[in-house]
Image (cartoon, rainbow, N blue to C red):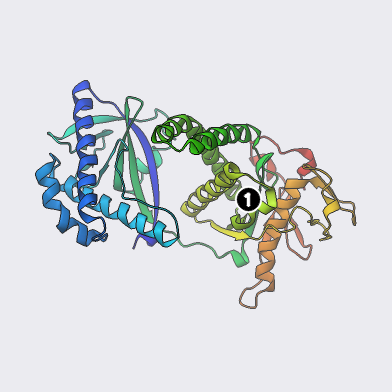
Amino acid sequence: MSANYVRRTAVTRLSVTQEQRETLEATIAEWKRGCQLATDLAWNRCHAKREVQPLAYDTVREKTTLGSQHAVLATQQAADAISGCIERKRMGKKTSKPRFTAPTVTYDARSMTLFDDGTVSLATVGDRIRCPLVLPDDEDGYQWQFLDSDEWALTESTLRARDGAYFLHLGFRRPKTERTTAEDGTVLGVDLGIENLAVTSTACFVNGRELTHRLREFEKTRAGLQQNGTRSAHRTLERASGHQLRYVRDVLHNAANDIVREARRYDCDVIALEDLAEIRTHTGAAWGHRWAFRTLSEYVSYKAEAVGIAVERVAPANTSRRCSECGFTVAENRRSRDEFRCQECGAEANADYNAAKNIGLRYVRRGHQSSRRTGDGRLALQSGTVTPNGGFTAYPDGFEAEFTDESAPSEAKS
């Protein structure tokens, strides 16, 4: 059933009084205790929600001040945590009984009510509290696209305490839309890299230099504290890496938005990304960048899915060495990190841009080579669309003038 929905989260700060703050602190403390009680009872006994709830519900109600619905949610949270441990163990990873230390508490339709006046009512260990959401004045603000829409329905949400403030991670969902199949559609190729975090076949460049610096700093902190191995080092790692991770995730969200925006701009049905299983060999990326690539890929996938665009993956082998114009493939074609010059036809381009076109063309060729597909797919460029056999269709006059974004580097234009 969940596979039939697109899900989104809109993070919104709460405006709370001192009395409400104290109530929320107490609620979070009891929530963690309730989750731990349920986990302790179910560990090595059961993990399905239908089994954990009858086993642990009465104990949670008796030993905490949680209301009935939050006691139910606590048993479900415990079941999810134990199931996650079982899955990690199945994959050969080390695991241990979950410990609930995060300053969060889960809410659903029975324990939370969202009002049209921008306030929310929350169940607590005492009486319900009602407080305003701190929403953007701009009607185009991110949260409004969910709050003002009949398409998005409110679902399970999470309250989180951070740096003395309270943030409500409002969950929304809507039914998935029908997507145009990629075989007959327009494809946006995307190359992932170090210097340029992402480059599209339409010559949209996402700079990665500052991100690289932050990832290296984060990796140094992570490696040093992990080597120490103590609980104190682990807590220090969480604190030290928190700011860096928030910055990196923000950069990756913005990069994903840029990629999806570019796909929509050029009316693409598919975004073609590199297969991440080969990303280390292709880029020589360290742990930090491999994590960033994987996270960026996830962000692009769910953001694209929300607007009806498919995300597909292709092997990146030789995409940086192959000429996207004539197909000649040799290591000498890539003269440096940034420069590509074909030894056969003399075509010159930014190396990452050339790779992005190859990634997109590789996916398009699947459709042209498969007997089950019509073979009408095409690659989106800045100036028009192209097929693997060299067929080119230019965009109408004035098409590019409709856009106000900064121009891509001149050497990367088609």
Measuring from the top left, give residue 246's x and y in whole percent.
47, 34
Q: Is residue 271 above or below residue 296?
A: below
Measuring from the top left, give residue 275's x and y in whole percent.
61, 57
Q: Residue at x 50, y 62 (%)?
A: 179
Of residue 68 and residue 285, the one placed in the foreground of this image is 285
Q: Amino acid at mark 1?
A: Tyr
Measuring from the top left, give residue 205's x and y in whole percent.
67, 40
How many marks are shown on the rendered structure?
A: 1
Q: Quadrant of residue 168?
A: top left
Of residue 309 and residue 340, the one placed in the foreground of this image is 340
Q: Residue at x 22, y 22 (%)?
A: 17
Q: Quadrant of residue 102?
A: top left
Q: Residues within 10 Å of mark 1 (few under 14, many from 20)?
A: some
Q: Residue at x 68, y 48 (%)?
A: 283
User: Which SS class for mark 1?
Assistant: loop
Quadrant holding the N terminus: bottom left
> Which residue corresponds to mark 1?
266
Residue 148 seen: no
User: On the picture, is 231 further left or further right than 288?
Assistant: left
User: On the picture, is 397 further left or further right than 144?
Assistant: right
Q: Residue at x 65, y 69 (%)?
A: 367
Of residue 57 and residue 333, the one placed in the foreground of this image is 57
Residue extending farthest to the top is: 18
Measuring from the top left, give residue 106's x and y in whole percent.
27, 43
User: On the picture, is 339 further left or further right than 375?
Assistant: right
Residue 123 seen: yes
Residue extending farthest to the bottom is: 371
